[in-house]
Image (cartoon, rainbow, N blue to C red):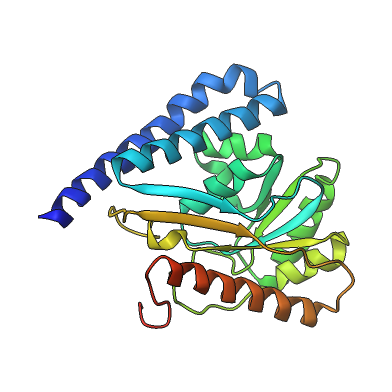
């Protein structure tokens, strides 16, 4: 019975949170079209709506730990669900994402992604995708902010091991900026697939920056180690064992 009630609550939450996306997007559109500030305030307003309603409809609280950077840095984050996208954007002063080009074709989301300065990459061969990513980043270099890349390339189920993509290492080398790793546990509360939302505290944690100048392989090894260890610790803190869950 308890699970059935939570599923109904989850359905209500999911329906309203996606319905509010075009509502808020269109409400802010006249400002956002002409102002980067308007774009940012619109996206942060939507994120806060999602957090507030998650808290009282499905019992999901959100928490940001560590110090979100304010300068020009590379953010290398783990990715488990749509919730970590919203939490990252709300926590950072000027976030922009590396996204799959299909995102740009999505109504409302696509238009705002362009206005935020997101970098689109086509699916395809790794070499071509990396070249395209670097060109997009260089073209948008004049837009200050925090460039977010998902190190494993896509959403990964909690407890599932997946390789870290070389693109994050290439960006680290090319940009010459500090890289701030981000650990998360949000997939435990807001799963990658399905309706059911699980009560708990969804956490993203900004870890100590990795300074520029490391060889690529050393950087990749350090990044994976700190993000995976901390993400697993956050999941255990929430009452889940990532080694046995999946």
- Indicate the quadrant where residue 31 lies: top right
Q: Can residue 7 be seen in this view?
A: yes
The residue nearer to you, when weighing 206 against 165, is 206
Side (left or right) of 30 relative to 172? left
The residue nearer to you, when weighing 138 against 183, is 183
Q: Position of residue 100 (x, y in %)?
A: 59, 55
Side (left or right) of 163 relative to 236? right
Q: Residue furthest top?
A: 30
Q: Where is residue 183 in the image (x, y as percent from the top left)?
A: 58, 64
Quarter holding the C terminus?
bottom left
Q: Is residue 118 visible?
A: no
Query: Residue at the spot x=44%, y=72% of the render?
Result: 236
Residue 44's place in the image compared with 96, above or below, is above
Query: Residue at the spot x=55%, y=56% of the render?
Result: 204
Residue 125's place in the image compared with 24, above or below, is below
Side (left or right) of 29 relative to 209? left
Quarter holding the N terminus?
bottom left
Q: How many marks?
A: 0
Residue 46's place in the image compared with 177, above or below, is above
The residue nearer to you, when weighing 119 against 145, is 145
Query: Residue at the spot x=28%, y=55% of the render?
Result: 196
- Indicate the quadrant where residue 182 lies: bottom right
Residue 104's place in the image compared with 167, above or below, is above
Query: Residue at the spot x=64%, y=67% of the render?
Result: 151
Q: Where is residue 147 in the image (x, y as percent from the top left)?
A: 73, 51
Q: Which residue lies furthest to the front in this view?
A: 237
- Indicate the quadrant where residue 142 lies: top right
The residue nearer to you, when weighing 153 against 57, is 57
Side (left or right) of 32 relative to 11? right
């Amino acid at each position: 019975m308890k699970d059935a009630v939570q599923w109904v609550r989850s359905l209500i939450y999911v329906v309203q949170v996606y319905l509010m996306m075009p509502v808020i997007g269109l409400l802010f559109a006249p400002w956002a079209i002409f102002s980067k500030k308007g774009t940012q305030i619109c996206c942060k307003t939507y994120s806060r709506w999602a957090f507030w309603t998650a808290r009282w409809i499905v019992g999901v609280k959100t928490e940001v730990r560590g110090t979100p950077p304010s300068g020009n840095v590379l953010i290398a984050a783990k990715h488990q669900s749509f919730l970590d996208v919203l939490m990252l954007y709300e926590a950072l002063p000027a976030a922009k994402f590396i996204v799959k080009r299909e995102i740009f074709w999505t109504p409302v989301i696509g238009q705002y992604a362009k206005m935020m300065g997101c970098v689109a990459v086509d699916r395809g061969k790794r070499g071509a995708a990396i070249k395209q990513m670097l060109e997009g980043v260089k073209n948008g270099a004049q837009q200050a902010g925090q460039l977010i890349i998902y190190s494993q390339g896509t959403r990964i189920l909690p407890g599932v091991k997946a390789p870290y993509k070389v693109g994050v290492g290439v960006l680290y080398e090319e940009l010459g900026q500090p890289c701030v790793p981000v650990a998360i546990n949000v997939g435990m509360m807001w799963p990658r697939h399905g309706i059911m939302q699980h009560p708990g505290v969804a956490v993203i944690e900004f870890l100590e920056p990795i300074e520029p100048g490391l060889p690529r392989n050393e950087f990749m090894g350090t990044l994976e180690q700190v993000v995976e260890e901390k993400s697993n610790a956050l999941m255990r803190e929430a009452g889940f064992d990532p080694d046995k869950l999946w």
